[in-house]
Protein backbone atom coordinates (compact mmCIF):
# COMPACT_ATOMS: atom_id res chain seq x y z
CA UNK A 1 0.00 0.00 0.00
CA UNK A 2 2.73 2.43 1.05
CA UNK A 3 4.68 1.31 -2.01
CA UNK A 4 1.77 2.31 -4.22
CA UNK A 5 1.43 5.64 -2.43
CA UNK A 6 5.13 6.32 -2.88
CA UNK A 7 5.02 5.43 -6.57
CA UNK A 8 1.97 7.64 -7.08
CA UNK A 9 3.58 10.59 -5.33
CA UNK A 10 6.80 10.38 -7.29
CA UNK A 11 4.88 9.88 -10.53
CA UNK A 12 2.75 12.96 -9.86
CA UNK A 13 5.49 15.26 -8.67
CA UNK A 14 6.87 16.28 -12.10
CA UNK A 15 3.31 16.87 -13.31
CA UNK A 16 2.54 19.13 -10.33
CA UNK A 17 5.84 20.94 -10.81
CA UNK A 18 5.21 21.34 -14.56
CA UNK A 19 1.70 22.69 -13.90
CA UNK A 20 3.09 25.14 -11.34
CA UNK A 21 5.79 26.25 -13.79
CA UNK A 22 3.22 26.65 -16.56
CA UNK A 23 1.10 29.00 -14.46
CA UNK A 24 4.14 30.75 -13.00
CA UNK A 25 5.55 31.60 -16.44
CA UNK A 26 2.23 33.15 -17.44
CA UNK A 27 0.94 34.72 -14.22
CA UNK A 28 4.08 35.11 -12.11
CA UNK A 29 2.36 33.32 -9.22
CA UNK A 30 5.65 33.42 -7.29
CA UNK A 31 5.46 37.22 -7.12
CA UNK A 32 1.87 36.97 -5.91
CA UNK A 33 2.94 34.56 -3.19
CA UNK A 34 5.87 36.77 -2.19
CA UNK A 35 3.55 39.78 -1.94
CA UNK A 36 0.47 38.27 -0.25
CA UNK A 37 1.16 34.60 0.54
CA UNK A 38 3.43 35.46 3.42
CA UNK A 39 0.97 37.86 5.01
CA UNK A 40 0.71 36.79 8.62
CA UNK A 41 -2.55 36.23 10.50
CA UNK A 42 -2.58 36.43 14.30
CA UNK A 43 -3.67 33.32 16.16
CA UNK A 44 -6.72 34.24 18.22
CA UNK A 45 -10.14 32.60 18.05
CA UNK A 46 -12.05 35.90 17.89
CA UNK A 47 -10.31 36.78 14.64
CA UNK A 48 -12.47 34.17 12.93
CA UNK A 49 -15.68 36.20 13.28
CA UNK A 50 -14.72 38.47 10.38
CA UNK A 51 -13.86 35.43 8.28
CA UNK A 52 -17.15 33.78 9.23
CA UNK A 53 -19.01 36.86 7.97
CA UNK A 54 -16.97 36.67 4.75
CA UNK A 55 -17.67 32.96 4.21
CA UNK A 56 -21.36 33.37 5.02
CA UNK A 57 -21.44 36.03 2.29
CA UNK A 58 -19.73 33.65 -0.17
CA UNK A 59 -22.30 30.93 0.67
CA UNK A 60 -25.13 33.47 0.24
CA UNK A 61 -23.87 34.50 -3.21
CA UNK A 62 -23.49 30.88 -4.40
CA UNK A 63 -26.83 29.64 -3.03
CA UNK A 64 -28.58 32.84 -4.12
CA UNK A 65 -27.19 32.38 -7.66
CA UNK A 66 -28.74 28.89 -7.72
CA UNK A 67 -32.12 30.13 -6.45
CA UNK A 68 -32.18 32.90 -9.06
CA UNK A 69 -32.50 30.21 -11.76
CA UNK A 70 -35.90 29.19 -10.39
CA UNK A 71 -37.30 32.32 -8.77
CA UNK A 72 -39.56 34.66 -10.80
CA UNK A 73 -39.70 38.27 -9.51
CA UNK A 74 -43.27 39.01 -10.62
CA UNK A 75 -46.48 39.58 -8.71
CA UNK A 76 -48.70 38.95 -11.72
CA UNK A 77 -51.35 36.39 -10.79
CA UNK A 78 -50.94 32.87 -12.21
CA UNK A 79 -52.80 29.63 -11.60
CA UNK A 80 -50.77 27.05 -9.74
CA UNK A 81 -52.18 23.87 -8.19
CA UNK A 82 -55.69 25.11 -8.95
CA UNK A 83 -55.09 28.32 -6.95
CA UNK A 84 -54.65 31.85 -8.28
CA UNK A 85 -51.48 33.20 -6.69
CA UNK A 86 -48.73 35.74 -7.50
CA UNK A 87 -46.07 34.26 -9.81
CA UNK A 88 -43.27 34.96 -7.26
CA UNK A 89 -45.16 33.00 -4.61
CA UNK A 90 -45.75 30.14 -7.08
CA UNK A 91 -42.04 30.01 -7.98
CA UNK A 92 -41.07 30.05 -4.31
CA UNK A 93 -43.48 27.16 -3.73
CA UNK A 94 -41.84 25.29 -6.62
CA UNK A 95 -38.41 25.81 -4.98
CA UNK A 96 -39.84 24.63 -1.67
CA UNK A 97 -41.27 21.47 -3.18
CA UNK A 98 -38.03 20.51 -5.02
CA UNK A 99 -35.85 18.74 -2.38
CA UNK A 100 -32.40 20.00 -3.48
CA UNK A 101 -33.68 23.50 -4.23
CA UNK A 102 -35.43 23.57 -0.86
CA UNK A 103 -32.19 22.60 0.91
CA UNK A 104 -30.37 25.39 -0.95
CA UNK A 105 -33.13 27.86 -0.04
CA UNK A 106 -32.92 26.91 3.62
CA UNK A 107 -29.10 27.15 3.61
CA UNK A 108 -29.50 30.62 2.06
CA UNK A 109 -31.95 31.59 4.80
CA UNK A 110 -29.66 30.42 7.64
CA UNK A 111 -26.52 31.86 6.03
CA UNK A 112 -28.13 35.32 6.22
CA UNK A 113 -28.66 34.86 9.98
CA UNK A 114 -25.11 33.58 10.43
CA UNK A 115 -23.64 36.47 8.43
CA UNK A 116 -25.42 39.08 10.53
CA UNK A 117 -24.61 37.29 13.81
CA UNK A 118 -20.93 36.99 12.79
CA UNK A 119 -20.76 40.67 11.86
CA UNK A 120 -22.19 41.61 15.25
CA UNK A 121 -19.72 39.35 17.09
CA UNK A 122 -16.87 40.69 14.92
CA UNK A 123 -17.91 44.22 15.74
CA UNK A 124 -18.15 43.43 19.45
CA UNK A 125 -14.63 41.99 19.42
CA UNK A 126 -13.32 45.14 17.79
CA UNK A 127 -15.26 47.39 20.14
CA UNK A 128 -14.33 45.56 23.34
CA UNK A 129 -10.65 45.28 22.46
CA UNK A 130 -10.49 48.95 21.41
CA UNK A 131 -9.06 48.11 17.97
CA UNK A 132 -11.28 50.69 16.25
CA UNK A 133 -8.77 53.27 17.48
CA UNK A 134 -5.94 54.87 15.51
CA UNK A 135 -5.14 53.82 12.76
CA UNK A 136 -8.32 51.73 12.20
CA UNK A 137 -11.05 54.39 12.48
CA UNK A 138 -11.71 54.23 8.74
CA UNK A 139 -12.20 50.47 8.79
CA UNK A 140 -14.66 50.79 11.67
CA UNK A 141 -16.72 53.19 9.54
CA UNK A 142 -16.44 50.99 6.44
CA UNK A 143 -17.43 47.98 8.56
CA UNK A 144 -20.59 49.75 9.71
CA UNK A 145 -21.47 50.50 6.09
CA UNK A 146 -21.11 46.74 5.48
CA UNK A 147 -23.46 46.00 8.37
CA UNK A 148 -26.08 48.43 7.02
CA UNK A 149 -25.78 46.97 3.51
CA UNK A 150 -26.12 43.44 4.89
CA UNK A 151 -29.24 44.40 6.87
CA UNK A 152 -30.61 46.00 3.68
CA UNK A 153 -29.98 42.83 1.65
CA UNK A 154 -31.63 40.72 4.35
CA UNK A 155 -34.66 43.02 4.44
CA UNK A 156 -35.20 42.75 0.67
CA UNK A 157 -34.65 39.00 0.75
CA UNK A 158 -37.44 38.78 3.30
CA UNK A 159 -39.97 40.14 0.83
CA UNK A 160 -39.14 37.93 -2.15
CA UNK A 161 -41.11 34.71 -1.30
CA UNK A 162 -44.17 36.95 -1.47
CA UNK A 163 -46.32 35.06 0.98
CA UNK A 164 -48.64 37.00 3.31
CA UNK A 165 -45.83 37.16 5.90
CA UNK A 166 -43.31 38.61 3.42
CA UNK A 167 -45.74 41.19 2.05
CA UNK A 168 -46.75 42.40 5.53
CA UNK A 169 -43.14 42.65 6.76
CA UNK A 170 -42.02 44.49 3.61
CA UNK A 171 -45.05 46.75 3.96
CA UNK A 172 -43.68 47.99 7.33
CA UNK A 173 -40.43 48.97 5.59
CA UNK A 174 -42.36 50.71 2.85
CA UNK A 175 -44.34 52.72 5.41
CA UNK A 176 -41.08 53.82 7.08
CA UNK A 177 -39.57 54.92 3.74
CA UNK A 178 -42.76 56.76 2.78
CA UNK A 179 -42.85 58.60 6.12
CA UNK A 180 -39.60 60.51 5.44
CA UNK A 181 -40.58 64.20 5.40
CA UNK A 182 -40.57 65.91 1.98
CA UNK A 183 -38.72 63.15 0.11
CA UNK A 184 -40.66 60.07 1.32
CA UNK A 185 -42.37 59.48 -2.03
CA UNK A 186 -39.13 59.66 -4.00
CA UNK A 187 -37.31 57.35 -1.56
CA UNK A 188 -40.13 54.78 -1.54
CA UNK A 189 -40.27 54.98 -5.35
CA UNK A 190 -36.54 54.16 -5.54
CA UNK A 191 -36.64 51.51 -2.83
CA UNK A 192 -39.94 49.78 -3.71
CA UNK A 193 -40.64 50.66 -7.34
CA UNK A 194 -43.71 52.74 -6.37
CA UNK A 195 -46.56 52.23 -3.94
CA UNK A 196 -45.98 48.84 -2.34
CA UNK A 197 -47.18 46.29 -3.42
CA UNK A 198 -47.34 47.33 -7.02
CA UNK A 199 -46.44 45.75 -10.34
CA UNK A 200 -42.87 47.07 -10.29
CA UNK A 201 -42.18 46.26 -6.62
CA UNK A 202 -40.77 42.76 -6.96
CA UNK A 203 -38.44 43.42 -9.90
CA UNK A 204 -37.07 46.47 -8.01
CA UNK A 205 -36.59 44.51 -4.79
CA UNK A 206 -35.08 41.56 -6.68
CA UNK A 207 -32.57 43.78 -8.50
CA UNK A 208 -31.56 45.46 -5.23
CA UNK A 209 -31.30 42.14 -3.37
CA UNK A 210 -29.46 40.19 -6.08
CA UNK A 211 -27.26 42.75 -7.88
CA UNK A 212 -27.04 46.21 -6.40
CA UNK A 213 -26.49 45.46 -2.71
CA UNK A 214 -24.23 42.37 -3.19
CA UNK A 215 -22.07 44.35 -5.65
CA UNK A 216 -21.86 47.22 -3.18
CA UNK A 217 -20.94 44.74 -0.43
CA UNK A 218 -18.21 43.27 -2.65
CA UNK A 219 -16.74 46.71 -3.39
CA UNK A 220 -16.89 47.93 0.21
CA UNK A 221 -15.62 44.59 1.53
CA UNK A 222 -12.69 44.80 -0.91
CA UNK A 223 -11.78 48.19 0.57
CA UNK A 224 -12.19 46.77 4.12
CA UNK A 225 -9.81 43.88 3.41
CA UNK A 226 -7.28 46.03 1.50
CA UNK A 227 -7.08 48.37 4.47
CA UNK A 228 -6.40 45.37 6.76
CA UNK A 229 -3.56 44.26 4.45
CA UNK A 230 -2.15 47.80 4.42
CA UNK A 231 -2.47 48.46 8.15
CA UNK A 232 -1.74 44.87 9.25
CA UNK A 233 -3.84 43.07 11.85
CA UNK A 234 -3.93 44.20 15.41
CA UNK A 235 -2.59 41.45 17.66
CA UNK A 236 -3.32 39.80 20.97
CA UNK A 237 -1.24 41.22 23.82
CA UNK A 238 0.99 38.16 24.12
CA UNK A 239 2.43 38.91 20.67
CA UNK A 240 4.06 42.06 21.97
CA UNK A 241 6.65 40.12 23.91
CA UNK A 242 7.43 37.76 21.08
CA UNK A 243 7.04 39.72 17.83
CA UNK A 244 9.66 41.93 16.23
CA UNK A 245 8.58 45.57 16.58
CA UNK A 246 6.26 46.48 13.69
CA UNK A 247 5.77 42.84 12.64
CA UNK A 248 2.73 40.60 13.13
CA UNK A 249 3.13 37.33 15.00
CA UNK A 250 1.06 34.47 13.64
CA UNK A 251 0.69 32.03 10.77
CA UNK A 252 1.32 32.90 7.10
CA UNK A 253 -1.65 33.13 4.75
CA UNK A 254 -0.28 30.38 2.51
CA UNK A 255 -0.73 27.56 3.25
CA UNK A 256 -1.77 27.64 6.95
CA UNK A 257 -4.37 30.41 7.19
CA UNK A 258 -5.78 29.46 3.77
CA UNK A 259 -6.24 25.84 4.90
CA UNK A 260 -7.83 26.93 8.18
CA UNK A 261 -10.12 29.20 6.17
CA UNK A 262 -11.18 26.33 3.89
CA UNK A 263 -11.84 24.18 6.97
CA UNK A 264 -13.94 26.94 8.52
CA UNK A 265 -15.88 27.38 5.27
CA UNK A 266 -16.59 23.64 5.06
CA UNK A 267 -17.60 23.40 8.73
CA UNK A 268 -19.90 26.39 8.30
CA UNK A 269 -21.43 24.89 5.18
CA UNK A 270 -21.97 21.58 7.01
CA UNK A 271 -23.64 23.27 9.98
CA UNK A 272 -25.81 25.35 7.65
CA UNK A 273 -26.91 22.18 5.81
CA UNK A 274 -27.86 20.59 9.15
CA UNK A 275 -29.80 23.69 10.17
CA UNK A 276 -31.45 23.76 6.73
CA UNK A 277 -32.51 20.14 7.06
CA UNK A 278 -33.62 20.12 10.69
CA UNK A 279 -34.70 23.71 11.38
CA UNK A 280 -36.26 24.99 8.15
CA UNK A 281 -37.89 28.45 8.00
CA UNK A 282 -41.69 28.59 8.15
CA UNK A 283 -43.38 26.76 5.24
CA UNK A 284 -44.91 29.12 2.67
CA UNK A 285 -48.34 27.56 3.21
CA UNK A 286 -48.25 28.62 6.89
CA UNK A 287 -49.20 32.16 5.86
CA UNK A 288 -50.27 31.43 2.26
CA UNK A 289 -50.44 33.96 -0.60
CA UNK A 290 -51.03 37.63 0.27
CA UNK A 291 -54.54 38.47 1.42
CA UNK A 292 -56.20 41.86 2.11
CA UNK A 293 -56.18 41.21 5.90
CA UNK A 294 -52.62 41.54 7.21
CA UNK A 295 -51.50 38.71 9.51
CA UNK A 296 -49.65 39.62 12.67
CA UNK A 297 -45.96 39.33 11.80
CA UNK A 298 -42.76 40.39 13.52
CA UNK A 299 -39.41 40.95 11.79
CA UNK A 300 -36.49 38.59 12.48
CA UNK A 301 -34.26 39.16 15.52
CA UNK A 302 -31.84 41.52 13.72
CA UNK A 303 -34.56 44.04 12.82
CA UNK A 304 -37.03 43.51 15.63
CA UNK A 305 -35.43 46.28 17.76
CA UNK A 306 -36.57 48.85 15.17
CA UNK A 307 -40.06 47.35 15.26
CA UNK A 308 -40.00 47.45 19.09
CA UNK A 309 -39.22 51.17 19.00
CA UNK A 310 -41.97 51.73 16.43
CA UNK A 311 -44.44 50.05 18.78
CA UNK A 312 -43.65 52.06 21.88
CA UNK A 313 -43.59 55.50 20.27
CA UNK A 314 -47.15 56.76 20.74
CA UNK A 315 -49.00 58.20 17.75
CA UNK A 316 -49.49 61.52 19.58
CA UNK A 317 -45.79 62.44 19.14
CA UNK A 318 -46.49 63.21 15.45
CA UNK A 319 -46.35 66.91 14.61
CA UNK A 320 -46.52 69.22 11.59
CA UNK A 321 -43.71 71.50 10.47
CA UNK A 322 -43.09 73.48 7.26
CA UNK A 323 -46.01 71.90 5.46
CA UNK A 324 -45.12 68.29 6.27
CA UNK A 325 -45.94 65.86 9.06
CA UNK A 326 -43.22 64.27 11.17
CA UNK A 327 -44.89 60.93 11.78
CA UNK A 328 -44.41 58.47 14.61
CA UNK A 329 -43.28 55.93 11.96
CA UNK A 330 -40.47 58.26 10.86
CA UNK A 331 -39.31 58.91 14.43
CA UNK A 332 -39.33 55.25 15.49
CA UNK A 333 -38.34 53.66 12.18
CA UNK A 334 -35.67 56.09 10.95
CA UNK A 335 -34.69 58.85 13.39
CA UNK A 336 -34.08 56.45 16.23
CA UNK A 337 -32.01 53.87 14.21
CA UNK A 338 -30.15 56.81 12.60
CA UNK A 339 -29.18 58.11 16.08
CA UNK A 340 -28.11 54.61 17.13
CA UNK A 341 -25.97 54.07 14.02
CA UNK A 342 -24.74 57.69 14.16
CA UNK A 343 -23.36 57.04 17.64
CA UNK A 344 -21.73 53.83 16.39
CA UNK A 345 -20.06 55.74 13.53
CA UNK A 346 -18.73 58.25 16.05
CA UNK A 347 -17.30 55.64 18.45
CA UNK A 348 -13.61 56.11 17.43
CA UNK A 349 -13.99 59.87 17.82
CA UNK A 350 -15.95 59.78 21.08
CA UNK A 351 -13.38 57.52 22.75
CA UNK A 352 -11.22 60.01 24.61
CA UNK A 353 -8.20 57.66 24.65
CA UNK A 354 -8.11 57.99 20.86
CA UNK A 355 -7.92 61.78 20.82
CA UNK A 356 -4.58 63.38 19.97
CA UNK A 357 -2.85 60.09 20.63
CA UNK A 358 0.78 59.69 19.61
CA UNK A 359 1.65 56.29 18.12
CA UNK A 360 -0.97 53.72 17.12
CA UNK A 361 -3.00 51.03 18.89
CA UNK A 362 -1.65 47.73 17.59
CA UNK A 363 -2.68 45.32 20.35
CA UNK A 364 -6.02 44.16 21.69
CA UNK A 365 -6.75 45.75 25.02
CA UNK A 366 -7.37 43.10 27.71
CA UNK A 367 -11.07 42.91 28.58
CA UNK A 368 -10.50 43.54 32.28
CA UNK A 369 -8.87 46.82 31.39
CA UNK A 370 -11.86 48.12 29.38
CA UNK A 371 -14.46 48.72 32.09
CA UNK A 372 -16.09 51.66 30.27
CA UNK A 373 -16.27 49.82 26.97
CA UNK A 374 -17.74 46.72 28.59
CA UNK A 375 -20.30 48.87 30.41
CA UNK A 376 -21.28 50.63 27.17
CA UNK A 377 -21.50 47.31 25.27
CA UNK A 378 -23.62 45.72 28.02
CA UNK A 379 -25.88 48.78 28.15
CA UNK A 380 -26.29 48.80 24.34
CA UNK A 381 -27.04 45.08 24.16
CA UNK A 382 -29.52 45.26 27.04
CA UNK A 383 -31.13 48.28 25.36
CA UNK A 384 -31.57 46.29 22.12
CA UNK A 385 -32.89 43.32 24.10
CA UNK A 386 -35.46 45.51 25.88
CA UNK A 387 -36.57 46.81 22.48
CA UNK A 388 -37.11 43.20 21.37
CA UNK A 389 -39.25 42.81 24.48
CA UNK A 390 -41.05 46.03 23.54
CA UNK A 391 -42.15 44.38 20.28
CA UNK A 392 -44.24 42.00 22.45
CA UNK A 393 -44.94 44.22 25.47
CA UNK A 394 -48.72 43.80 25.32
CA UNK A 395 -48.28 40.00 25.30
CA UNK A 396 -46.48 40.35 28.66
CA UNK A 397 -49.31 42.51 30.06
CA UNK A 398 -46.99 45.51 30.37
CA UNK A 399 -48.32 49.04 30.07
CA UNK A 400 -46.64 51.62 27.80
CA UNK A 401 -45.23 53.38 30.87
CA UNK A 402 -43.81 50.15 32.25
CA UNK A 403 -42.09 49.15 29.02
CA UNK A 404 -40.61 52.66 28.69
CA UNK A 405 -39.25 52.39 32.22
CA UNK A 406 -37.65 49.04 31.35
CA UNK A 407 -36.19 50.32 28.07
CA UNK A 408 -34.62 53.35 29.78
CA UNK A 409 -33.58 51.93 33.16
CA UNK A 410 -32.48 48.35 32.44
CA UNK A 411 -29.51 49.38 30.21
CA UNK A 412 -28.32 51.98 32.75
CA UNK A 413 -28.52 49.55 35.66
CA UNK A 414 -26.89 46.65 33.77
CA UNK A 415 -24.16 48.91 32.38
CA UNK A 416 -23.39 50.26 35.88
CA UNK A 417 -23.23 46.74 37.34
CA UNK A 418 -20.90 45.60 34.53
CA UNK A 419 -18.68 48.63 35.15
CA UNK A 420 -18.47 47.96 38.89
CA UNK A 421 -17.63 44.26 38.37
CA UNK A 422 -14.89 44.96 35.80
CA UNK A 423 -13.34 47.73 37.91
CA UNK A 424 -13.18 45.32 40.83
CA UNK A 425 -11.39 42.76 38.66
CA UNK A 426 -9.13 45.32 36.97
CA UNK A 427 -5.42 44.44 37.04
CA UNK A 428 -3.13 46.66 39.06
CA UNK A 429 -0.69 47.10 36.18
CA UNK A 430 -2.23 48.28 32.94
CA UNK A 431 -1.26 46.90 29.56
CA UNK A 432 -0.71 49.62 26.97
CA UNK A 433 -2.17 48.40 23.66
CA UNK A 434 -0.16 50.86 21.58
CA UNK A 435 2.68 49.86 19.27
CA UNK A 436 5.89 48.83 21.08
CA UNK A 437 7.51 51.89 22.46
CA UNK A 438 10.96 51.59 20.90
CA UNK A 439 12.60 54.57 22.64
CA UNK A 440 11.43 53.27 25.99
CA UNK A 441 12.89 49.84 25.18
CA UNK A 442 16.15 51.56 24.34
CA UNK A 443 16.06 53.50 27.56
CA UNK A 444 15.45 50.25 29.48
CA UNK A 445 18.55 48.77 27.86
CA UNK A 446 20.52 51.89 28.65
CA UNK A 447 19.38 51.67 32.25
CA UNK A 448 20.38 48.03 32.35
CA UNK A 449 23.82 48.80 30.94
CA UNK A 450 24.28 51.66 33.36
CA UNK A 451 23.78 49.07 36.10
CA UNK A 452 26.81 47.16 34.79
CA UNK A 453 28.97 48.63 37.54
CA UNK A 454 26.56 47.30 40.18
CA UNK A 455 28.03 45.15 43.00
CA UNK A 456 26.27 42.06 41.56
CA UNK A 457 27.98 42.67 38.25
CA UNK A 458 31.39 43.12 39.89
CA UNK A 459 30.92 39.90 41.92
CA UNK A 460 30.00 38.06 38.72
CA UNK A 461 33.10 39.40 37.05
CA UNK A 462 35.41 38.24 39.87
CA UNK A 463 33.69 34.85 40.05
CA UNK A 464 34.04 34.36 36.33
CA UNK A 465 37.70 35.43 36.39
CA UNK A 466 38.51 33.04 39.25
CA UNK A 467 36.70 30.17 37.54
CA UNK A 468 38.76 30.70 34.42
CA UNK A 469 41.99 30.68 36.43
CA UNK A 470 41.32 27.46 38.39
CA UNK A 471 42.62 25.07 35.78
CA UNK A 472 44.50 27.31 33.44
CA UNK A 473 48.13 27.44 34.71
CA UNK A 474 49.14 23.81 35.31
CA UNK A 475 46.75 21.69 33.26
CA UNK A 476 48.05 20.05 30.15
CA UNK A 477 47.10 21.71 26.88
CA UNK A 478 44.87 18.92 25.51
CA UNK A 479 42.89 18.92 28.76
CA UNK A 480 42.63 22.69 28.64
CA UNK A 481 41.30 22.39 25.09
CA UNK A 482 38.60 19.97 26.31
CA UNK A 483 37.65 22.35 29.13
CA UNK A 484 37.50 25.24 26.67
CA UNK A 485 35.21 23.25 24.40
CA UNK A 486 32.96 22.31 27.32
CA UNK A 487 32.90 25.92 28.35
CA UNK A 488 31.80 27.06 24.88
CA UNK A 489 29.04 24.44 24.80
CA UNK A 490 27.82 25.37 28.29
CA UNK A 491 27.88 29.05 27.42
CA UNK A 492 25.82 28.45 24.29
CA UNK A 493 23.26 26.50 26.32
CA UNK A 494 23.11 29.33 28.81
CA UNK A 495 22.63 31.91 26.06
CA UNK A 496 19.86 29.85 24.44
CA UNK A 497 18.00 29.82 27.76
CA UNK A 498 18.27 33.58 28.02
CA UNK A 499 16.58 34.31 24.66
CA UNK A 500 12.96 33.59 25.72
CA UNK A 501 13.48 35.52 28.97
CA UNK A 502 14.62 38.60 27.07
CA UNK A 503 11.69 38.29 24.64
CA UNK A 504 9.07 37.88 27.34
CA UNK A 505 10.17 40.08 30.16
CA UNK A 506 9.01 43.59 30.66
CA UNK A 507 10.76 43.83 34.00
CA UNK A 508 13.93 45.99 33.85
CA UNK A 509 15.44 44.18 36.84
CA UNK A 510 15.20 40.83 35.12
CA UNK A 511 16.72 42.39 32.03
CA UNK A 512 19.65 43.64 34.10
CA UNK A 513 20.17 40.15 35.51
CA UNK A 514 20.20 38.73 31.99
CA UNK A 515 22.72 41.32 30.87
CA UNK A 516 24.90 40.47 33.86
CA UNK A 517 24.78 36.81 32.97
CA UNK A 518 25.67 37.67 29.38
CA UNK A 519 28.61 39.68 30.63
CA UNK A 520 29.70 36.76 32.82
CA UNK A 521 29.58 34.41 29.85
CA UNK A 522 31.46 36.89 27.68
CA UNK A 523 34.21 37.40 30.25
CA UNK A 524 34.40 33.67 30.96
CA UNK A 525 34.79 32.84 27.27
CA UNK A 526 37.34 35.64 26.81
CA UNK A 527 39.38 34.42 29.75
CA UNK A 528 39.34 30.83 28.58
CA UNK A 529 40.27 31.96 25.15
CA UNK A 530 43.14 34.05 26.43
CA UNK A 531 44.55 31.33 28.70
CA UNK A 532 44.24 28.82 25.87
CA UNK A 533 46.16 31.19 23.57
CA UNK A 534 48.75 31.75 26.31
CA UNK A 535 49.19 28.00 26.80
CA UNK A 536 49.41 27.33 23.07
CA UNK A 537 51.94 30.12 22.63
CA UNK A 538 53.94 28.84 25.62
CA UNK A 539 53.90 25.32 24.21
CA UNK A 540 54.90 26.56 20.75
CA UNK A 541 57.72 28.58 22.28
CA UNK A 542 58.99 25.56 24.20
CA UNK A 543 58.74 23.39 21.05
CA UNK A 544 60.63 26.02 19.07
CA UNK A 545 63.25 26.19 21.79
CA UNK A 546 63.56 22.38 21.80
CA UNK A 547 63.80 22.26 18.02
CA UNK A 548 66.41 25.04 17.65
CA UNK A 549 70.00 23.57 17.33
CA UNK A 550 72.25 23.79 20.36
CA UNK A 551 74.78 26.61 19.89
CA UNK A 552 78.15 25.15 18.86
CA UNK A 553 80.69 25.20 21.57
CA UNK A 554 83.58 26.77 19.84
C1 LIG B 1 -19.66 42.00 5.75
C2 LIG B 1 -19.19 42.30 6.93
C3 LIG B 1 -17.76 42.20 7.37
C4 LIG B 1 -16.80 41.33 6.94
C5 LIG B 1 -16.93 40.20 5.93
C6 LIG B 1 -15.59 41.68 7.64
C7 LIG B 1 -14.40 41.00 7.51
C8 LIG B 1 -13.25 41.28 8.23
C9 LIG B 1 -12.08 40.44 8.30
C10 LIG B 1 -11.91 39.10 7.57
C11 LIG B 1 -11.17 41.06 9.10
C12 LIG B 1 -9.77 40.55 9.50
C13 LIG B 1 -9.89 39.57 10.65
C14 LIG B 1 -10.39 40.18 11.93
O1 LIG B 1 -9.83 41.16 12.41
O2 LIG B 1 -11.42 39.67 12.44
C15 LIG B 1 -11.76 42.32 9.53
C16 LIG B 1 -11.14 43.27 10.33
C17 LIG B 1 -11.73 44.43 10.78
N1 LIG B 1 -13.08 44.76 10.67
FE1 LIG B 1 -14.44 43.76 9.60
N2 LIG B 1 -15.84 42.75 8.47
C18 LIG B 1 -17.16 43.09 8.34
C19 LIG B 1 -17.84 44.06 9.04
C20 LIG B 1 -17.26 44.89 9.98
C21 LIG B 1 -17.96 45.77 10.89
C22 LIG B 1 -19.48 45.85 11.00
C23 LIG B 1 -17.01 46.47 11.58
C24 LIG B 1 -17.19 47.52 12.64
C25 LIG B 1 -18.17 48.30 12.75
C26 LIG B 1 -15.72 46.04 11.12
C27 LIG B 1 -14.52 46.56 11.53
C28 LIG B 1 -13.28 45.95 11.32
C29 LIG B 1 -12.02 46.45 11.82
C30 LIG B 1 -11.78 47.75 12.61
C31 LIG B 1 -11.04 45.50 11.47
C32 LIG B 1 -9.55 45.52 11.82
C33 LIG B 1 -9.46 44.80 13.13
C34 LIG B 1 -8.08 44.48 13.62
O3 LIG B 1 -7.09 44.56 12.90
O4 LIG B 1 -8.06 44.14 14.81
N3 LIG B 1 -15.90 45.06 10.18
N4 LIG B 1 -13.03 42.42 9.00
Image: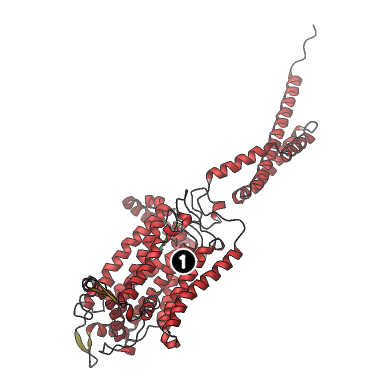
Which residue bears the numbered disc 1? 124
* Residue depicted at x 39% and y 66%: 54
Which quadrant of the rendered structure holds the C terminus? Answer: top right
Judge from the rendering whether residue 39 lies leftward or rightward of residue 527; answer left or right: left
Residue 56 rendering spot, x and y as whole percentages: 39, 70
Residue 425 percent across, percent down from the top left: 60, 64
Q: How dense is the environment of label 1, judged by Cα within 10 Å: few (below 14), some, or many (20 and up)?
A: some
**View extreme (top): residue:** 554
Q: In which quarter of the image is residue 75?
A: bottom left
| Residue closer to the observer: 40 or 20 | 40
Q: Residue at x 37, y 76 (%)?
A: 306
Ligand 1 positioned in quadrant: bottom left
Say left or right for 140 vs 514.
left
Residue 128 place in picture, x, y as percent: 49, 63
- Residue at x 77% of width, y 12% of height: 551
* Total tally of numbered discs in the picture: 1
Q: Is mark 1 on a helix, strand or loop?
A: helix
What color scheme is it? secondary structure
- The foreground one among 93 and 444 is 444
Answer with left or right where residue 542 lies relative to residue 257: right
Residue labelled 1 has its Cβ within 8 Å of some atom of ligand 1: no
Q: In this view, does 375 lie above or below 292?
A: above
Q: Quadrant of residue 181?
A: bottom left
Q: Can residue 160 be seen in this view?
A: no
| Quadrant of residue 255 within the rendered picture | bottom left
User: From where the camera sits, is residue 469 visible?
Assistant: yes
Q: Position of residue 217 (x, y in %)?
A: 32, 65
Q: Which residue is drawn at 64% across and 41% down?
A: 448
Q: Is residue 533 above or below residue 257?
A: above
Q: In this view, does 103 lie above or below 238?
A: below
Amino acid sequence: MSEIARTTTTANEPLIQETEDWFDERLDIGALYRKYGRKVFPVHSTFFFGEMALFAFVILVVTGGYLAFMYIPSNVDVTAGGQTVPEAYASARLIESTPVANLVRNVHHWAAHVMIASIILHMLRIFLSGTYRKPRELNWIIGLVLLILTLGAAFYGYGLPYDAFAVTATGIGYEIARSIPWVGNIVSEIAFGGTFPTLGSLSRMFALHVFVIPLLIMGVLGAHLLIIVKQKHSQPGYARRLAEPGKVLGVPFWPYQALMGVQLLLVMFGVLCLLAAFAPPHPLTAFGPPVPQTPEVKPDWYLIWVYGMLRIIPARVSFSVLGTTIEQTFIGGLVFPAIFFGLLFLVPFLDRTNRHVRGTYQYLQPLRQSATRIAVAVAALVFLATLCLAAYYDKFDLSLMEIWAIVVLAPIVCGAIAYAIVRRLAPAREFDPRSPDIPSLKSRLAAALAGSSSPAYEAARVQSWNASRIFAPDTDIAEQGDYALDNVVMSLHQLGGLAPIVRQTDDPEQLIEVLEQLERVRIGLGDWNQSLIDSIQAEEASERAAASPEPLDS
